[in-house]
Image: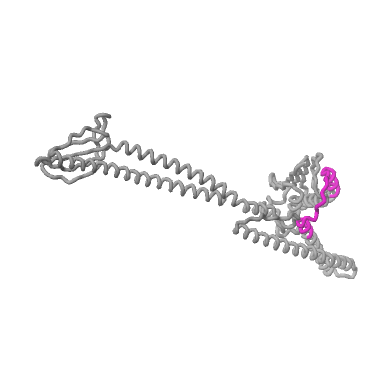
């Protein structure tokens, strides 16, 4: 979840809670204020009654006006004034309504009367609801506008951050593309861009040093390995060697050969990663596979491996040298990791190549399959870099590779835009 989205959700939840709390508090406070206004009006009626009695020594005769109801009841003693709410039957509307009522005592000619003055609250409630709803609608509208403006403003403020992140997504060591982070007057983003720029430049420098070291080391190692192989080959041919000495030298020669192949494979991987195979051209895969089949036929015949082919016209635009290495590795693996008397299936169609072979054991570990130095068995004579090279070539050439194990067969499928 994006920070911006999470912020909006938290903000909206907080605003909703605040909206409810403010609505309830506003309704309660407004109700109390309006009820207080009614109480003050009732107390004015009380003062009018007291004033009238003091002048006329009789109770005033009220007709119900302004929906105010006045009643007199004889009582035997003075009663303390009380203001409260009461349900009183409204003869005009023929239903019981909520009234605010003041009850007080008034003495007239030596007789105590209980005076009740009541004023309906329906109008007050209606006014309260109207004011509350109107205010809340306005408040809700303001919150909506605020959220919308907040979203637009934050989106604009965070734009430099997303631009920088998109630049970092496209960053790849070894590429010649220049990465420019946007200028911004926001201090935090400016600081982030400075740190990212420093990290990018540092990574490029370290990568360049590592690249130069790898290339130089591989080239320097290759020369003495070639000399050692040449000398060992001469010594092995010496007829005066004992059988034990000959076996030891052959073992050393095999080890040097493996080391030389390993060095060549690592150097090839470094060259691919360093984008040193930039030349691309259209390649006729049907013709290329035909050449490879003729080269591997002797090896497959020696192991009694039957080859089934279904080759249709197909082409790909890529580096010829890399495609040649790709096919060599795939066809070599299909023969070396096969059973004696096994089979190989090669199917080619526009945009798709499939190479399958009968398996000695079960399926390969798909999580580690294309990793460096992965071997089907720890006792394998392979250096474990073949499929890693295949994957690097696919990534470089725009091919999608997929491995399946079905019907006791290893199946490698390659797809590209034809």
Q: Position of residue 206 (x, y in %)?
A: 72, 64
Question: Which residue corresponds to the image point at 16% horizontal and 43% vertical from the top-left?
Answer: 105
Front residue of 134/204: it is 134
Residue 294 included in the magenta stretch of the image: yes
Colouring chosen for the image of the structure: one colour
Q: Position of residue 338 (x, y in %)?
A: 75, 50
Q: Which residues are magenta?
A: 267-295
Residue 326 included in the magenta stretch of the image: no
Front residue of 13/406: it is 13
Left or right, 24 with reference to 302: left
Front residue of 358/187: it is 187
Left or right, 142 with reference to 89: right
Question: Which residue corresponds to the image point at 59% horizontal and 52% vertical from the top-left?
Answer: 157
Taking the view exactly as shown, the residue that stands out farthest to the right is 239
Question: Which quarter of the figure is the C terminus placed in?
Answer: top right
Q: Position of residue 55 (x, y in %)?
A: 15, 40
The secondary structure that most of the magenta stretch takes on is helix
Tell me if I can see residue 33 in this picture: yes
Front residue of 93/107: it is 107
Left or right, 185 with reference to 110: right
């Amino acid at each position: 979840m994006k920070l911006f989205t999470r912020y909006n959700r938290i903000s909206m939840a907080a605003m909703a809670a605040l909206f409810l709390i403010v609505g309830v508090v506003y309704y309660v406070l407004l109700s109390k204020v309006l009820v207080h206004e009614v109480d003050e009006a009732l107390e004015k009626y009380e003062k009018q009654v007291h004033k009238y009695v003091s002048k006329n020594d009789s109770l005033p005769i009220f007709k119900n006006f302004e929906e105010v109801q006045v009643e007199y009841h004889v009582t035997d003693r003075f009663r303390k004034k009380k203001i409260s709410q009461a349900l009183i039957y409204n003869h005009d509307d023929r239903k019981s309504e909520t009234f605010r009522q003041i009850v007080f005592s008034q003495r007239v000619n030596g007789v105590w009367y209980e005076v009740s003055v009541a004023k309906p609250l329906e109008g007050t409630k209606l006014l309260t609801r109207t004011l509350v709803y109107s205010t809340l609608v306005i408040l809700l509208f303001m919150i909506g506008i605020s959220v919308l403006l907040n979203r637009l403003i934050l989106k604009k403020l965070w734009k430099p951050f997303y631009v920088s992140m998109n630049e970092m997504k496209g960053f790849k060591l070894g590429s010649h593309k220049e990465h420019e982070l946007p200028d911004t007057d926001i201090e935090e983003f400016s600081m982030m861009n400075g740190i990212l720029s420093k990290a990018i430049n540092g990574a490029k420098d370290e990568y360049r040093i590592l690249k130069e070291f790898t290339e130089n080391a591989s080239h320097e190692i290759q020369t003495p390995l070639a000399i050692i192989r040449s000398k060992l080959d001469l010594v092995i041919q010496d007829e005066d060697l004992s059988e034990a000495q000959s076996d030891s030298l052959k073992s050393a020669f095999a080890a040097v050969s493996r080391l030389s192949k390993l060095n060549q494979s690592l150097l090839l991987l470094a060259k691919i990663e360093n984008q040193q195979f930039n030349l691309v051209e259209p390649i006729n895969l049907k013709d290329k596979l035909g050449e490879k089949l003729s080269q591997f036929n002797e090896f497959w015949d020696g192991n009694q491996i039957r080859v089934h082919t279904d080759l249709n016209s197909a082409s790909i635009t890529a580096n010829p040298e890399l495609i040649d290495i790709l096919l060599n590795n795939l066809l070599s693996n299909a023969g070396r990791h096969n059973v004696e008397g096994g089979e190989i299936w090669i199917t080619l169609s526009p945009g798709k190549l499939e190479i399958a072979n009968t398996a000695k054991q079960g399926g390969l570990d798909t999580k580690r399959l294309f990793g460096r130095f992965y071997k089907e068995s720890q006792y394998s004579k392979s250096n474990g870099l073949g499929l890693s090279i295949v994957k690097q070539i696919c990534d470089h050439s725009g091919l999608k590779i997929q491995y399946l194990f079905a019907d006791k067969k290893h199946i490698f499928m390659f797809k590209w835009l034809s």
